[in-house]
Image (spheres, grey):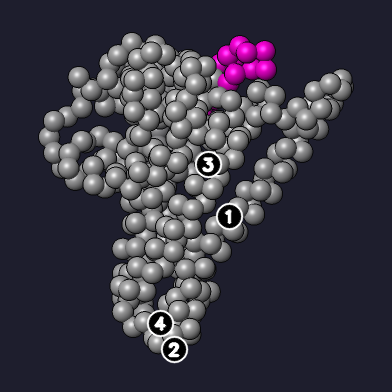
Amino acid sequence: MNKYTSIGGQALIEGIMMKSREKSALCVRLPDGSIDTSYMEYEPLGKRYKFFRIPIIRGVTAFVESMIQGYKALMLSADKSGFTDFEEDKPKTEEEPKKDSALLNTVMIIGAVLGCVLAVVLFMYLPRLLVSGIESLFNVEITSKLLRSFIEQFVKLAVFVCYVCIVSLMKDIKRVFMYHGAEHKTIFCYEKGLELTVENVKKQKRFHPRCGTSFMILMILISVVFSTLLQVIFPSVYSIKWLWVLAKILMIPLICGVGYEVLKICGRYDNIITRIISAPGVWLQRATTKEPEDDMIEIAIAALKACEPEIPDVERPDDNI
């Protein structure tokens, strides 16, 4: 019988991080072909303070903590896998690896900042600008708040889907997506109570309702509701472009928190309602997950075994929502 488990993971550079309530394990394929296993020490805020366990609040907190931990794991996997060794044939002094690591950290931070700026432009300013462009082009005024919101969110969703599909064609990103597929398949195998072997894992599907891809899609869909409500309650805000963008930025924590709760429900229950909610994210996982190679599955199995909780998970409840 299927088990409900809180174990999640993240695909890295030549590796996978698996995370349970007890620990986070990171397994990386080293340049010599061996598997390196390490643990990331962290204590969620929810364990220390009850406030961060409140619904909605816990979603925002989990998202921020996941981003921070995921970044650290990504940097660690890049270093261990040899991804940062640009000049393998040239011997290095003791100080050079530290300089390379500092340089990579700097590049990643700059990239993250530029990525945030680009995200604001593409997902918040561009949709609003496009609506104004349609009005100017056809010399009409879109008075329907629902239609305005639909056009904006459709543009946002289209940009996101196109971006994911394009980057999935890149060689290095494709390998990360293959590890993503290995992560999902291994978790499914564990949830079914099967022995964690390469053959058993290969038989599993690679689309999981608790995936981060589903979370991103949920955030976009939920933002349709919140954006429409904002236009109805504060119609004057929409007429000022920069204020509208600022308002949408301020809504991100709320959208993130609601999306987390919905995703948590979809991962815990399996019925017609949760399947419909999960469908867009599961469909997009066809781009963000790829069929893994056997050695990638070995990494996923090693990571899951390393973080597997000592207390067995409870069986999936049969009641519906």
- The quarter in which the N terminus is drawn is top left
Q: Amino acid at mark 4?
A: Ser
Q: Is residue 218 visible?
A: yes
Q: CA distance from mark 3 to mark 1?
A: 20 Å
* Rendered position, 263 above or below 298: below
Viewer-nearest residue: 140 or 101: 140
Tell me which residue sits at (55%, 41%) in the image. Answer: 169
Number of the label disc, if any, that sits on residue 116: 1
Is the residue marked by circle 3 packed among few (<14), some (14-19), or many (20+) residues within 10 Å? some
**What residue is disc 4 on?**
236
The answer to whether the residue labelled 2 contacts the one labelled 1, judged by CB atoms less than 8 Å apart, is no
The verdict on residue 192 being magenta is: no
Q: CA distance from mark 2 to mark 1?
A: 33 Å
**What residue is disc 3 on?**
168
Tell me which residue sits at (21%, 36%) in the image. Answer: 269
Give the magenta part as a residue range.
Answer: 28-42
Specify which label sits upstream in the sequence, 2 or 4: 2
Q: Amino acid at mark 3?
A: Ser
Q: CA distance from mark 4 to mark 1?
A: 27 Å
Specify which label sits upstream in the sequence, 2 or 1: 1
Specify which label sits upstream in the sequence, 3 or 1: 1
Is the residue marked by circle 1 packed among few (<14), some (14-19), or many (20+) residues within 10 Å? few
Q: Position of residue 280 (x, y in %)?
A: 33, 48
**What residue is disc 2 on?**
139
Q: CA distance from mark 3 to mark 4?
A: 40 Å
* Rendered position, 246 above or below 80: below
Q: Is residue 299 visible?
A: no
Tell me which residue sits at (32%, 73%) in the image. Answer: 147
Viewer-nearest residue: 221 or 268: 221
Is the residue marked by circle 4 packed among few (<14), some (14-19), or many (20+) residues within 10 Å? few
